[in-house]
Amino acid sequence: MQNLASGQKSYQDAPRTKKAATGDQLVIDFLGKLDGVEFDGGKAEGAALVIGSGQFIPGFEEQLVA
């Protein structure tokens, strides 16, 4: 039930002056590179990410928290 509920959570746009925090959803564009070379599956535009969800590689989400 908790997984179902968390999948239905809605978010509202925050003022641009608000700093990102754990639990916030960000919409991000990113390009992943390995040794300076873009790799398959490492690019997205408009990807939704909830900080603290563990969806990305370790350390990535923590860098988004201001």
Image (cartoon, rainbow, N blue to C red):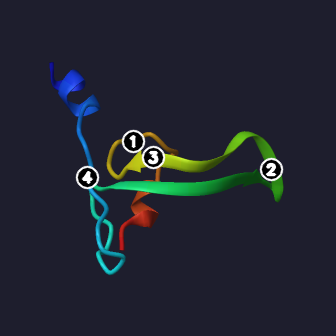
Q: Closer to us: mark 3 or mark 1?
A: 3
Query: Label 4: how many residues lie within 10 Å, few (<14), some (14-19) or many (20+)?
Result: few
Q: Position of residue 57 (x, y in %)?
A: 52, 45
Q: Which numbered disc, 4 or 2, marks the residue that appears first in the sequence?
A: 4
Checking the image for residue 48, the label placed there is: 3
Q: Position of residue 37 (x, y in %)?
A: 84, 53
* Left or right relative to 40: residue 23: left
| Location of residue 65 (image quadrant) | bottom left
Q: CA distance from mark 2 to mark 1?
A: 22 Å
Q: Where is mark 2, residue-wise? A: 38
Q: Position of residue 62 (x, y in %)?
A: 40, 60
Q: Residue at x 82, y 59 (%)?
A: 36
The residue positioned farthest toward the bottom in the image shown:
17
Quarter of the image for the C terminus: give it.
Answer: bottom left
* Badge 1 vs badge 4, beta-carbon distance below 8 Å: no
Q: Reply above or below: 55 against 38.
A: above
Identity of the amino acid at label 1? Gly
Q: Position of residue 32 (x, y in %)?
A: 69, 52
Query: Label 1: how many residues lie within 10 Å, few (<14), some (14-19) or many (20+)?
Result: few
Q: CA distance from mark 2 to mark 3?
A: 21 Å
* Badge 2 vs badge 1, beta-carbon distance below 8 Å: no
Q: Which numbered disc, 2 or 3, marks the residue that appears first in the sequence?
A: 2
Q: Residue at x 32, y 49 (%)?
A: 52
Q: CA distance from mark 4 to mark 2?
A: 29 Å
Q: Residue at x 27, y 56 (%)?
A: 12
Checking the image for residue 23, the label placed there is: 4
Which residue occupies the foreground of this view, 32 or 47?
47
Q: Where is mark 1, residue-wise? A: 54
Q: Closer to us: mark 3 or mark 4?
A: 3
Q: Which numbered disc, 3 or 1, marks the residue that appears first in the sequence?
A: 3
Q: CA distance from mark 1 to mark 4?
A: 11 Å
